[in-house]
Amino acid sequence: MNKIVRHNFPVSRLPEELRDGIVANVVNVTVEEVSPSRRDPVALEEIFEMARKLRTRTGVEIDAEIRAQRDAWDD
């Protein structure tokens, strides 16, 4: 795994989203490569997006389906 460390790095050169909340003028920055075995947050977001698109059913619809399945067992 690759790792880069920069000591006394100017905060003004950091991307804006990383500067939020930093009061100092210089920081130590460590960047580490993520190993392929770790979960990819983008992939997880894609899973959540797919879940949001799934058709949801009401309790009444679910109860009706279960009732129909139980009735089929009795036949």
Image (cartoon, grey):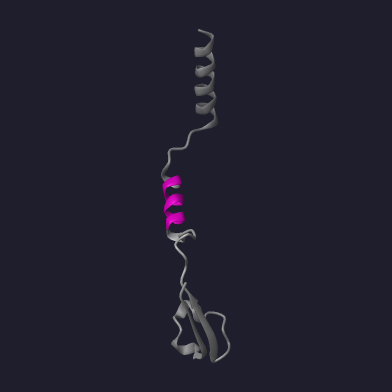
Give the residue furthest to the front.
Answer: 1
Q: Is residue 30 above or below residue 9?
A: above
Question: Whole-percent x and y of residue 51?
Answer: 45, 45
Residue 69: give x, y in percent of width and height. 50, 18
47 is within the stretch colored magenta: yes
Residue 74 horizontal/vertical position (percent): 54, 9
**Viewer-proximal residue among 7 and 19:** 7
Name the residue furthest top: 75
Indicate the position of residue 63 as horizontal and vertical percent values: 54, 25
Is 40 part of what is drawn in magenta?
Answer: no
Answer with the quarter of the image where residue 28 lies.
bottom right
> Up-down: is 23 above or below 58?
below
Examine the residues drawn in magenta and state their main secondary structure: helix
- Residue at image position (43%, 41%) is 54
Q: At 50% from the left edge and 23% from the top edge, which residue is drawn?
A: 65
Where are the magenta residues, as a range?
A: 43-51
Residue in view at x 52 percent, y 80 percent: 30
Q: Residue at x 42, y 53 (%)?
A: 46
Viewer-proximal residue among 21 and 4: 4
